[in-house]
């Protein structure tokens, strides 16, 4: 259970290793059949997205991109690896996620990392950003929390 604190004097910012642990926990908690479908996806954590990635999306600030799926999704024959094909990877960008977390105190860092990871896995499963926004809107309309409390 998450606990809000006002005593930050002895706390450090979560490291790349801390983020990898959060992502690993989120992946381990995926229910079937999603866990099996995502079994070949690796997760990598970096401070920020590379400049060429940001330029490719027309972004000026590295704080605009919290995560990225890179690879061939399941709907694009990604289920059968090809020779020379790089692994399907979800990238999480620590500094952008921390910035979002600092500005939005409604969710824990773990909830935000999980949300970004699942969003990027949605691309692996063949969903567009618009598809996922529609699913989130439908969940909101049905009273289902986007960030479930545990």
Image (tube, helix red, strand yellow):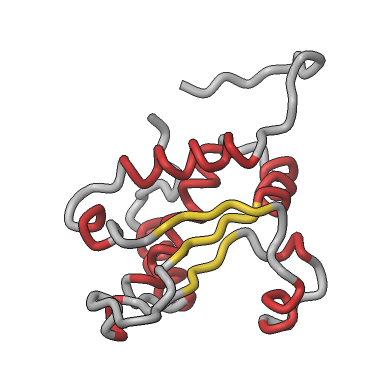
Q: Residue at x 31, y 85 (%)?
A: 76
Q: Which quadrant is home to the C terminus?
A: top left
- Residue 148 location (% of width, % of height): 40, 40
Q: Furthest residue to the left?
A: 33
- Residue 32 location (% of width, % of height): 18, 52
- Residue 113 location (% of width, % of height): 53, 46
| Numbered disc total | 0
The quadrant holding residue 106 is top right
Q: Is residue 92 above or below residue 21?
A: below
- Residue 69 location (% of width, % of height): 49, 69
Left or right, 22 with reference to 50: left
Q: Is residue 44 above or below residue 73?
A: above
Q: Residue at x 72, y 75 (%)?
A: 54
The quadrant holding residue 71 is bottom left
Left or right, 141 with reference to 10: left
Q: Is residue 77 above or below residue 43?
A: below
The quadrant holding residue 123 is bottom left
Q: Residue at x 23, y 48 (%)?
A: 31
Left or right, 74 with reference to 19: left
Q: Furthest residue to the front?
A: 83
Q: Residue at x 66, y 33 (%)?
A: 14
């Amino acid at each position: 259970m998450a606990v809000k604190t006002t005593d930050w004097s002895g706390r450090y910012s979560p490291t790349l290793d801390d983020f990898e642990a959060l992502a690993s926990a989120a992946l381990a908690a995926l229910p079937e059949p999603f866990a099996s479908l995502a079994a070949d996806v690796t997760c990598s954590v970096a401070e920020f997205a590379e400049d060429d990635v940001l330029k490719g999306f027309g972004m000026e600030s590295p704080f605009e991109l919290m995560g990225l799926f890179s690879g061939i999704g399941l709907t694009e024959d990604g289920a059968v690896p090809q020779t020379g094909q790089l692994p399907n990877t979800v990238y999480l960008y620590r500094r952008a996620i921390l910035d979002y977390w600092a500005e939005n105190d409604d969710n824990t860092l773990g909830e935000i990392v999980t949300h970004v990871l699942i969003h990027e896995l949605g691309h692996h499963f063949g969903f567009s950003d618009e598809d996922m926004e529609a699913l989130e809107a439908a969940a909101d309309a049905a009273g289902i929390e986007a960030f479930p409390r545990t």
